[in-house]
C-alpha cells in the first residue's frame, strides 16, 4: 500500500508554469500517474510514468507542454506544466497502479488532489 500527498498547485496566468509534486510513502514501486478533474467533468488522464521512469505517456491535450518525471530515491513524482491554458484548470490527482494504464479505474491509490487555476 502507498500513501501520496500532492503539492505545488496554485493560481497562475495563462502561459505560465507550475510544478506539481507527489510525495509517496509506504510501498512505492508502482506505475504512477497524474489525472485531473474539473467541476462537472469526468476524471481525465494526464500523464503516467513507469516504475523506472524510462517510459512515459501523455494525453494529447498536454503533450509537448507537460512533463512527468520521478525521483525514486526521494519517492516523489513530478508534473512540470508549461504554457498553461485556462482549460488546464482542474484538481490534479496523483495515483498509483500495478498495471500500466491510462484508465483511472485501474489506479488503486490516490492522493487528495491539488487545485490548479489558470487565469486568462
Image (tube, rainbow, N blue to C red):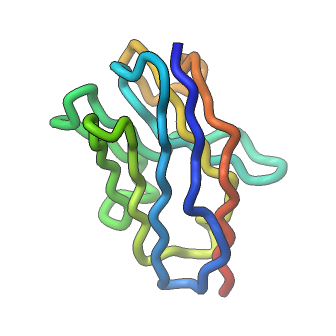
Q: Is residue 49 left or right of residue 81?
A: left
Across and down, in percent, residue 118 comes to: 64, 76
Q: Residue at x 48, y 41 (%)?
A: 23
Residue 88 in which image quadrant: bottom right
Q: Residue at x 60, y 80 (%)?
A: 12
| Farthest-out residue, right | 40
Q: Nearer the viewer, residue 107 or 114?
A: 114
Looking at the image, is 49 positioned above or below residue 91? above
- Count the marks: 0
Looking at the image, is 63 positioned above or below residue 28? below
Q: Residue at x 26, y 37 (%)?
A: 73
Across and down, in percent, residue 94 comes to: 54, 39
Q: Is residue 46 left or right of residue 37?
A: left
Residue 33 in which image quadrant: top left
Q: Nearer the viewer, residue 55 or 59?
A: 55
Across and down, in percent, residue 42 comes to: 71, 40
Q: Residue at x 42, y 59 (%)?
A: 62
Residue 48 in which image quadrant: top left
Q: Quadrant of the C terminus?
A: bottom right
Q: Is residue 84 left or right of residue 39?
A: left
Amino acid at each position: 500500500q502507498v500513501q501520496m500527498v500532492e503539492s505545488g498547485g496554485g493560481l497562475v496566468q495563462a502561459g505560465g508554469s507550475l510544478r506539481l509534486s507527489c510525495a509517496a510513502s509506504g510501498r512505492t514501486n508502482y506505475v504512477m500517474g497524474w489525472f485531473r478533474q474539473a467541476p462537472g467533468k469526468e476524471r481525465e488522464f494526464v500523464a503516467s510514468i513507469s516504475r523506472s521512469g524510462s517510459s512515459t505517456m501523455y494525453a494529447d491535450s498536454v503533450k509537448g507542454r507537460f512533463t512527468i518525471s520521478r525521483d525514486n530515491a526521494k519517492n516523489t513524482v513530478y508534473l512540470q506544466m508549461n504554457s498553461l491554458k485556462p482549460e488546464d484548470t482542474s484538481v490534479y490527482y496523483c495515483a498509483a497502479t500495478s498495471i500500466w494504464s491510462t484508465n483511472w479505474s485501474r489506479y488503486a491509490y490516490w492522493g487528495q488532489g491539488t487545485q490548479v487555476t489558470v487565469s486568462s
